[in-house]
Image: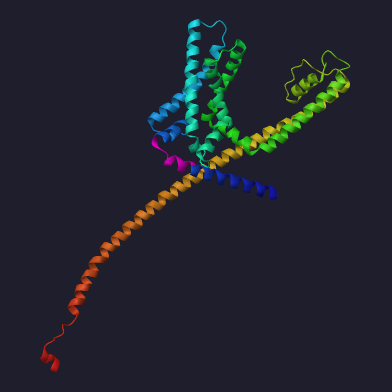
Amino acid sequence: MESDDKSERDEERERHRERVDRFRRRLKVSRAPEFKRQTFYALENLRKANWPAKIVGGALFTLILLNAVVVFFSTQPGLDPVAASVIQGFYRFSTVCFCLEYLARIWIADLAYGNCSPSRARLRYIFSPWGIIDLLSFGPNLVAWFVPITPQVQDIISVVRLVRLVKISRYMRGLRTIGRVIAKHYHEIVAAFLVIAMLVVVSSVVMYEIEHPAQPDKFNNLLSGVYWAVTTVTGTGYGDLVPITPAGRIVGSVIMFLSVALVAIPGGIFSAGFVAEFQNANLRKIERDVRREDARQDGRDEQERTAQKGGSDSDGSAPAQEGGTASADEVPVQDSSPNVQQK
């Protein structure tokens, strides 16, 4: 019970912190200049952007998708020289666009991180995982334009260019949800993988000691035992390394049963995290809808009260005026002549 209460309090604090961060970010965005605000919307929130910003954001997303498609064509052997030159030109154009995007994200970092000062927000973005991914998406290609490189380095740059495909996850809600689940259940996930790693290490050493005398050409070092353990624990089982001794087969059977239970733990953590995350998202949506509806109802009630007050004021002013006239007529006029005073 205490652990459940603690987790609920932690989740409530996390939601409160997220609400505060969103409020600060919205406040900063609302106070920013129009061009900077639209730049932020083009890169972070296309739904609130105007049509030029939406065009820029959509073009950037299309460029990322085209890079994912062109990667497959550029690796084909015997590529036509004209097609190869077109692909190289496309890569140069993409490098320039991603460089401009990186600079723009540094510029609007103070709007993206509402709880930081401008300089700290920019440093936070530069050294964040997304900032490093954005830098790697164009940095090596940009350096290769000005520095002579060898074919081996060019191959490395081509591999690093695949980082551009990761940028697609910015526009996919499911991939962002994976990141939030990992961040919230970091300790449980690390503990589960540590247990699996311990099982791999122990089983590889035991299997190497058992099988090395029987088949030294297969289990020739400890790394071969690690390879067997990984393929067995993960359920892959290529079949190129198998135990042939009775003791090895018994150990292998035990490892298989243990791996079935242990490998399922990270999957259960991820599944529970996904369910909780989507439930929280639905609750946040319901809360927003309720607050919006309450605001509309309050507005309607205020309008009704204003209308009733205005009607009552207009209706009460006429009787008050008539009553005042009647009271004035009923008041007797005193005669101030000397004869009356003598009587």
Q: In percent of the image, x 40 and y 37: which residue is there?
A: 33
Relative side of 234 to 276, left or right: right
| Residue 35, percent from left and from top | 40, 34
Q: Residue furthest front?
A: 147
Q: Quadrant of residue 49?
A: top left
Q: Is residue 57 above or below residue 142?
A: below
| Residue 301, percent from left and from top | 38, 54
Q: Nearer the viewer, residue 203 or 235?
A: 203
| Residue 232, percent from left and from top | 76, 23
Relative side of 35 to 25, left or right: left
Q: In percent of the image, x 45 and y 39: which residue is there?
A: 29
What predominant SS class does the magenta segment belong to? helix
Q: In percent of the image, x 24 and y 68: which residue is there?
A: 319
Q: How is the image coloured?
A: rainbow
Number of residue marks: 0
Magenta span of residues = 25-34
Is residue 343 among the parts visible in the rendering? Answer: no
Q: Nearer the viewer, residue 41 or 262?
A: 41
250 magenta-colored: no
Relative side of 13 to 309, left or right: right
Q: Is residue 210 above or below residue 268?
A: above
Q: Nearer the viewer, residue 57 or 143?
A: 143
Q: Nearer the viewer, residue 137 or 270?
A: 137
Relative side of 310 to 233, left or right: left
32 magenta-colored: yes
